[in-house]
């Protein structure tokens, strides 16, 4: 991959990119749906964090399940969350750290060497600390879900060639860190009459990508500066997963 600056434009530089997930937190009517979405979104990243801390399989599962049930679902964490304190994910990780610490004080839970998290396909290039593993698993989970929904949407709407161009020019280079297929090659492969037509088709799918992404990250909000910060944050997670 050629670096974060080049990646930034891959999905649309100034697109309305969602942050997680401040807008819905203050809305009591959406709180239960928000809890359910966050449970699904964060179980794997939190479990991976606990494994990277050196906890055995069952202990990591217990900490993850207990935290999500006791803190995220059963108490007032979301309703008391304060946007001014920083990114939601950072606050969630800090709360999980505290939850683990309290649990260790109450009962002795053995920790060992850094646990294998190969089931989550965390690349070797990702820094070997729990927070980096958490970020990578979270971002990968979101991206997988978004791309699956985007592909289904394109198939439904007869945009198979649009999706193919998006894969060749954006998805494969982004995920594999390889150069994008040249536009002429893409035009030949998908029987597109001109490079300008292929470019317009690509723009169409980029816009759809941003809309689908917004649905998956729960709520969209904040200023344009915060939106751009979220773009940089997401792309930086993937850039650190590439070998030097």
Image (tube, helix red, strand yellow):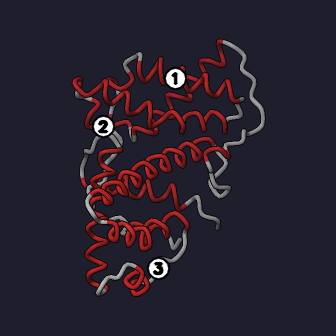
Residue at position x 60%, y 38% in the image: 48
Where does residue 162 sit, x and y in percent of width and height? Answer: 32, 69
Label 2 to label 1: alpha-carbon separation: 20 Å
Name the disc covering residue 181, or none.
3
Residue at position x 30%, y 55% in the image: 153
Residue receiving disc 2: 22
Where does residue 111 sit, x and y in percent of width and height? Answer: 74, 28
Q: Residue furthest right?
A: 113
Q: Residues within 10 Å of mark 2 (few under 14, many from 20)?
A: many
- Element class at badge 1: helix
Q: Is residue 241 above or below residue 99?
A: below
Between marks 3 and 2 in the image, the one whose residue lies nearer the viewer: 3
Q: Earlier in the sequence, mark 2 or mark 1?
A: 2
Q: Are marks 3 and 2 in contact (CB under 8 Å)?
A: no
Between marks 2 and 1 in the image, the one whose residue lies nearer the viewer: 1
Q: Are marks 2 and 1 in contact (CB under 8 Å)?
A: no
Q: Earlier in the sequence, mark 3 or mark 1?
A: 1
Q: Residues within 10 Å of mark 1 (few under 14, many from 20)?
A: many
Residue receiving disc 1: 67
Label 3 to label 1: alpha-carbon separation: 45 Å
């Amino acid at each position: 991959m050629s670096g974060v600056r080049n990646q930034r434009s891959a999905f649309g530089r100034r697109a309305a990119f969602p942050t997680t997930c401040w807008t819905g937190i203050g809305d009591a009517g959406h709180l239960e749906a928000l809890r359910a979405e966050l449970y699904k979104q964060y179980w794997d990243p939190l479990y991976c964090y606990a494994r990277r801390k050196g906890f055995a399989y069952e202990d990591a599962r217990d900490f993850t399940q207990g935290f999500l049930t006791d803190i995220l679902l059963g108490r007032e964490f979301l309703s008391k969350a304060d946007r001014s304190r920083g990114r939601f994910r950072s606050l969630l990780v800090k709360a999980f750290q505290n939850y683990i610490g309290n649990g260790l004080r109450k009962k002795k839970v053995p920790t060992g060497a850094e646990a294998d998290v190969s089931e989550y396909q965390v690349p070797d290039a990702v820094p070997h600390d729990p927070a980096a593993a958490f970020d990578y698993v979270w971002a990968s989970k979101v991206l997988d879900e978004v791309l699956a929904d985007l592909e289904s949407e394109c198939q439904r709407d007869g945009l198979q060639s649009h999706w193919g161009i998006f894969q060749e020019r954006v998805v494969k280079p982004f995920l594999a860190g390889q150069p994008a297929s040249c536009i002429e090659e893409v035009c030949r492969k998908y029987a597109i009459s001109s490079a300008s037509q292929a470019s317009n088709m690509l723009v169409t799918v980029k816009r759809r990508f941003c809309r689908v992404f917004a649905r998956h990250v729960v709520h969209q909000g904040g200023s344009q500066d915060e939106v751009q910060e979220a773009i940089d944050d997401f792309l930086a997670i993937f850039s650190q997963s590439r070998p030097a």
